[in-house]
Amino acid sequence: MVLWDLDSKDTARDFGAAQIEAHLRGRIAALATRGQPIVVLFHELDADTRGNIQRYIDAMRQAMPQGYSLEFPRSRAEVAGIFRSRR
């Protein structure tokens, strides 16, 4: 099982790319106040996500406060390690 902090809403059919960007910007800014890693859920099987992923990454980078960086875990074990580090 992999947990996440932020659902990107990339499979919500009533959300277009612009709404997803706005959602990501707002939630990243809000969650960053916790001072902990943020795990964002995207669905790689969704064609709209694949076509717009760079746009979403750019939106998240713009919303991140100074001192935050964007990283891409390569495995479930790395994601699990992020959650273990919060204890």
Image (cartoon, rainbow, N blue to C red):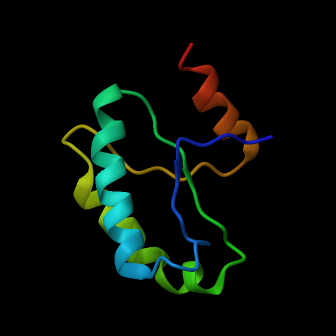
Residue 53 in the image, given as x and y percentages of width and height = 49, 75
- List the single residue furthest toward the left: 66
Q: Assign the C terminus to one quadrant of the image.
A: top right
Q: In which quarter of the view is residue 18 placed? A: bottom left
| Residue 68 vs residue 44, the one in the foreground | 44
Q: Is residue 14 left or right of residue 3?
A: left
Count of numbered circles in the view: 0
Residue at screen point 56% across, 78% down: 49
Residue 68 in the image, given as x and y percentages of width and height = 30, 41
| Residue 37 vs residue 31, the one in the foreground | 31
Q: Assign the N terminus to one quadrant of the image.
A: top right
Residue at screen point 47% across, 76% down: 15
| Residue 72 vs residue 12, the one in the foreground | 12
Q: Is residue 70 left or right of residue 40?
A: left
Q: In which quarter of the view is residue 11 placed? A: bottom right
- List the single residue furthest toward the right: 1
- List the single residue furthest toward the top: 87
Residue 38 in the image, given as x and y percentages of width and height = 46, 40
Residue at screen point 42% across, 76% down: 54
| Residue 23 vs residue 78, the one in the foreground | 23
Residue 30 in the image, given as x and y percentages of width and height = 30, 41
Q: Is residue 12 left or right of residue 68?
A: right
Residue at screen point 42% across, 70% down: 20
